[in-house]
Amino acid sequence: MSTGQRQIQRVELCCEELTLHCPFCGSVVFDTEPIDEDWQTPCAHTLFVADDNHLIHRSVRFDGLMQIEGVQTKDVDFGDDYTDGFTDKVFCSGSVKFAIYLFGRSGFGIYVGFAPDEADIIA
């Protein structure tokens, strides 16, 4: 954890359908309808996209923050946490994580983290 960095903020959403826009640029990053190959389209502000057991998208910045550069996704050690708890441990000023619990899909969780451009962070 870097000095002066703040832990990621968490927003929980429970819904059946959702279109999630990046809070920094407005791009659609996640859409529940339909879930196919294009259900997630990370923008430059997207730190990660994960489900309950897997990291689906990892940015270079996320890898650096979590000290997992060069580690294959399947080899990332979540410790005693699943991806939800693991991604709660991000320290990056201005970052926000949306924890999305989808009713009708067995409580399936999707976790999407965003951070502003480093140049836009006010110390």
Image (cartoon, helix red, strand yellow):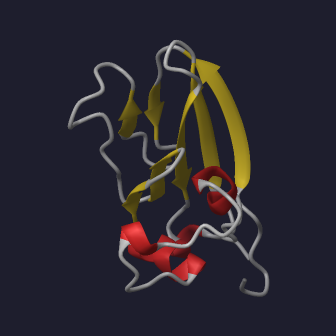
Q: Nearer the viewer, residue 33 or 120?
A: 33
Residue 94's place in the image compared with 2, above or below, is above
Q: Give x and y (percent) for residue 89.
A: 71, 66
Q: Give x and y (percent) for residue 82.
A: 62, 54
Q: Quadrant of the C terminus?
A: bottom right
Residue at 72% of width from left, 83% of height from top? 1
Q: How many marks?
A: 0
Q: Nearer the viewer, residue 54 or 123?
A: 54
Residue at 50% of width from left, 67% of height from top? 117
Residue at 45% of width from left, 51% of height from top? 49
Q: Give x and y (percent) for residue 91.
A: 70, 71
| Relative horizontal placement of residue 49, taking residue 12 as reference (left or right) | left
Tell me the quarter of the picture where residue 103 sits.
top right
| Relative horizontal placement of residue 117, taking residue 11 as reference (left or right) | left
Residue 58's place in the image compared with 113, above or below, is below
Q: Nearer the viewer, residue 29 or 67?
A: 67
Residue 106's place in the image compared with 72, above or below, is above
Residue at 33% of width from left, 19% of height from top? 33
Tell me the quarter of the picture where residue 90 sits.
bottom right
| Relative horizontal placement of residue 103, taking residue 73 as reference (left or right) | right
